[in-house]
Image: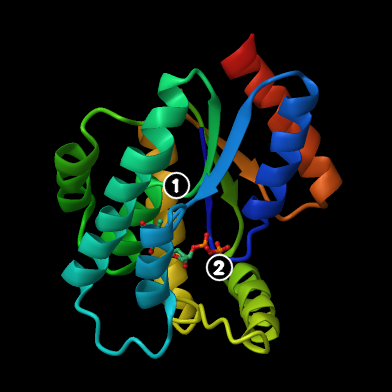
Amino acid sequence: MTFEGLDGCGKSTQMELLAEALRRDGLDVVTTREPGGTPTGEKIRGVILDSRTRSLAPMAELALMFAARAQHIAEIIRPALDAGRFVLCDRFTDSSEAYQGGGRQMGSELVLTMHQVVCGDLMPDMTILMDSDAEASVARARRRNKANASDGVDENRFEKEKVEFFERVRAAYNKIAVREPTRVFKVNARRAKDVVHPEIVAAVRERMLG
Ligand code: TYD
């Protein structure tokens, strides 16, 4: 299953909390993330997210996302699923549909076609969409990335986008949630993390483990 949402919506924290809860239930949980998740994927991540990467063509950006994803599936996701493990992934194709399809206005159809070519029928059984307004999420992500910058990590390229970009991303996410209600569980992420967490655990237990 996957976690999705705008930058700074708190999804990474919620994913870790869920992983801990599922491990306490005795499940064999693997946590991973995109773009990245593998040594090669992390190199691609560096290219995509570094704000020193100038004038990256939208199609190149999309292709790099799927390049990292192809490696991630081959090296991590497939082997884990084949071994019967529970895979929790921070972002997957919905991110490409929301950010490149919506944010960069490349459209859903192209992204879903690429998904078919690269990933075949591999889709998460369940997706937690952490919904939050663009303004607050971006402000939070910018603060975090400024703090990381002192460690020499620059992951600012997307956060430099305007609020309108993130509003398009959010709208695209919401369209996916409406289109696929049985897969996508939307939570209001603008609440305290100890309020959001039990809601996610309850939904996962009901839909995945029930
Ligand atoms: P992430 O590390 O999850 O950032 P955050 O913790 O701030 O949410 O994701 C990095 C960025 O990559 C994020 O701005 C979204 C973007 N992204 C895409 O644009 N398309 C994709 O397919 C993926 C996986 C990520």
- Report the residue at 17% width, 68% height from top: 59
- Residue 181 in view of the camera: no
As drawn, is 150 to the left or to the right of 93?
A: right
For disc 1, the marked residue is 174
The location of residue 206, given as percent across then percent down, is 65, 15
- Disc 2: which residue: 134
Label 2 environment density (alpha carbons within 10 Å; few <14, some 14–19, many ≥20): many
Q: In the structure shown, which secondary structural element does the residue marked by tag 1 occupy?
A: helix
Residue nearest the viewer, comparing 121 with 168: 121
Indicate whether 1 appears above or below 193. above
Q: In which quarter of the image is the C terminus?
A: top right
In percent of the image, x 30 and y 59: which residue is there? 65
Asked if 190 appears above or below 148 in the picture, the reply is: above
Mark number for residue 56? none
Judge left or right: residue 194 versus residue 171.
Answer: right
Disc 1 residue: CB within 8 Å of ligand 1? no
Amino acid type assigned to the residue bearing label 2 in the image: Ala
**Contact between labelled residues 2 and 1, with CB atoms less than 8 Å apart:** no
Tell me the distance, in whole angstroms, between the alpha carbons under discs 1 and 2. 13 Å
Rendered view: 99 above or below 120: below
Residue 46: image quadrant is bottom left
Among the two numbered marks 1 and 2 on one chain, the one whose residue lies closer to the N terminus: 2
For badge 1, the amino acid type reads: Asn
